[in-house]
Amino acid sequence: MKKVHVFNAGPCLLPQEVYDSAVEAIRNFAGTGVSVLSISHRTKEWDAVMDETRALWRELLNIPDEYEIIFLGGGASLEFLYVPMNFLEKKAAYLDTGVWAHKAFKEAKGLGNAVEIASSSDRNYTYIPKGYEIPSDADYFHITTNNTIYGTEIKEDIDSPVPLIADMSSDIMSRPVDVSKYAMIYGGAQKNVGPAGVAFCIIRKDALGKVSRYIPTMLDYRVHIDKLSMFNTPPVFSIYIMHETLKWIKSMGGVGAVHAMDVRKAETLYAEIDRNPLFTGTAEKEDRSIMNVCFVMAPGYEALQDEFFSFAKAHDIIGIKGHRSVGGFRASLYNACQQEDVEALVDCMKEFEKLHA
Ligand SMILES: *Cc1c(COP(=O)(O)O)cnc(C)c1O
């Protein structure tokens, strides 16, 4: 296969080892002679995958015993509804850091009293709001740790006086997290831990069971916890690939080790954006994401944008188009993206500079 440098924002690049084991499992799952696509999810071989996948999550993120880990269909977008359904009684507080954060808020508002306590929409979400106050009477405070579209990131585990719930779709497993600071962490797997089709939820069990509404069976986290994510047929293949991806993270030395690699990749690309007169970064420096690097042509060079897309494509650089709501460029440096891929992009930017500066 031709070597291309893939910077897609999601579904993300996965390690070659994961693709290889996916192919093998489609042919012959765990030596059963049956494809993983056709295996019954009520078999001991499949139970073993579920158990190991939960155990890998627990080990890689150091998840305490009071937390349950479940895997659900519907993506992060359905979690936007699950969260207020399971946690909102009187009032929910949301931090508005972009389109995804706002979509999560919208679902809470549809179910009850929800407020956005701070927003960075005034400057097209290029920064993370600071100095806001979290209302102490809220049932929970919801944040989006990494804003995939704008390239901003909350890089610390913040203190919250009320249960903290985080959408970590696009930076999960890119840094060690103090899980004990959260009531819940969730996300779609397809940004950093697997393919599309499954969402992960890490939930502190005692945070559940506090709402009085009727919760439809499929939307009740307690049902999925009780049934070990197999109340109904789980997204078997997506979970299998997530399992393989987590094994790969472990083989790389765990989350601390991939974090060091992720930081180096991001620093390499931001350094070039800051040095190269043709380009400029869009996010506030202190809030820059290590996962999604957003940039545009610098003032005076705007007309070169399409030419740079073609130039990059000719250099086998794939997936650097910015989200349609912001334009420009976005390079997503998820865990499976390698330092050499970033260096290929940087070399391409340098060559382009020679042609035009
Ligand atoms: C991609 C993304 C989502 C939406 O995920 P789906 O699985 O497609 O529903 C939500 N939140 C963030 C931060 C994302 O990056």
Image (cartoon, grey):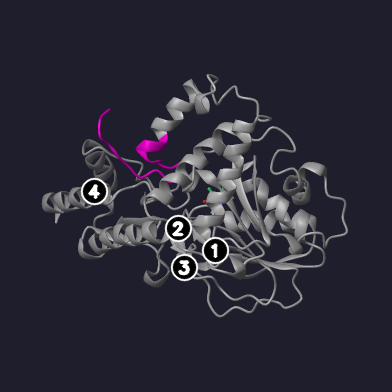
Q: Which residue is mark 2?
A: 150
Q: Nearer the viewer, mark 4 or mark 2?
A: 4
Q: Which residue is mark 1?
A: 97
Residue 330 shown in magenta: no
- Magenta-tinted stretch: 1-18
- Looking at the image, which residue is at 54% across and 64% down? 121
Q: Is residue 130 above or below residue 180?
A: below
Q: Tell me the quarter of the picture where residue 104 sits.
A: bottom right
Q: Quadrant of the N terminus?
A: top left
Residue 45 position, x and y percent, is 59, 31
Q: Which residue is mark 4?
A: 340
Is tag 4's residue or tag 1's residue first in the polypeptide sequence? 1
Asked if ligand 1 lies within 8 A of label 1, the reply is: no
Q: Residue 155 — which label?
A: 3
Residue type pointed to by label 2: Tyr
Residue 282 position, x and y percent, is 37, 62
Is tag 4's residue or tag 3's residue first in the polypeptide sequence? 3
Q: Marks 1 and 3: in contact by CB < 8 Å? A: no
Q: Nearer the viewer, mark 3 or mark 1?
A: 3
Residue 113 position, x and y percent, is 78, 64
Q: State the SS at label 4.
A: helix
Residue type pointed to by label 3: Lys
Q: Marks 2 and 4: in contact by CB < 8 Å? A: no
Residue type pointed to by label 1: Thr
Q: Is residue 244 above or below residue 346?
A: above
Magenta stretch, main secondary structure, is loop
Q: Residue 224 — which label?
A: none
Give me the C-alpha separation between circle 2 and circle 1.
9 Å
Residue toward you, 212 or 19:
19
